[in-house]
Image (tube, rainbow, N blue to C red):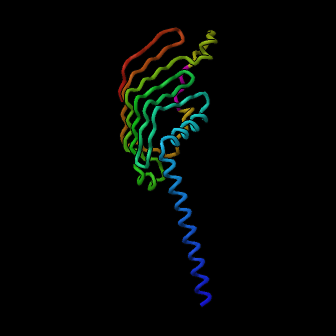
Amino acid sequence: MRRADSRHRRFGWLVKGSAACTGVLVLLLCALMLPPVQARLLRLVSASLDGVTVEADAIGFGPRGGALKGLSIEGPGFSLQADAVDLALNPWASLRGLKLAVDALQFSAVRVHLQPAPAAAADAAPGPATTFRGLAPILRWPQRVSVKAAAAQGSLLWESADQRTLSGPWEL
């Protein structure tokens, strides 16, 4: 009788411990769904990008996707503003394939401004021109990302070091 009682107590502690861990995990996930927490996480991630600032007026994400309103990304030689960014995720495909599975990605009213980097404009010595190297050097994506559908529309303004400009609408 004593042995069965000891097993029952150990099993009770196991159940209580599992319930406590599950409760803490649920509270953590609920906290991550709060927009102020997500805005703070966005600031922390953008602080790790050298020379690039990322800001958003409103942010809201959940397990099935989310939205950014008033997105602004600025760095040396470029700036990007988007009125809205909508993202639809497929959580089951993400878990199955151990990847980030994006069902739809929509950028609305994107304004891209490319110009020579400030240091390059100040040192306008004859020689090879400094070019915009793209966003790849500053972006750190997960290893596997799949996007089923993406759409964007906006305008582009490109200024060269010799004061020539190119502007116009674009759509993807």
The image shows residue 5, relative to residue 58, as above or below, that is below
Magenta span includes 134: yes
Percent position (x, y) of residue 78?
52, 22
Residue at left offset 49%, top offset 14%? 159
Question: What range of the chain is rendered magenta?
Answer: 131-135
Residue at left offset 47%, top offset 49%? 99
Residue sticking out furthest to the bottom: 1
Residue at left offset 55%, top offset 41%? 41
Q: 44 or 158: nearer the eye?
A: 44
Placement of the C terminus among the 4 image quadrants: top left
Percent position (x, y) of residue 141?
52, 41
Q: 8 or 93: nearer the eye?
A: 8
Magenta span includes 41: no
Percent position (x, y) of residue 113?
47, 20
In the picture, measured across the screen, residue 125 lies left or right of residue 144, that is: right
Q: Principal SS element in the magenta part?
A: loop
Placement of the N terminus among the 4 image quadrants: bottom right
Quarter of the rendering containing residue 119: top right
The image shows residue 126, relative to residue 2, as above or below, that is above
The image shows residue 8, relative to residue 123, as above or below, that is below
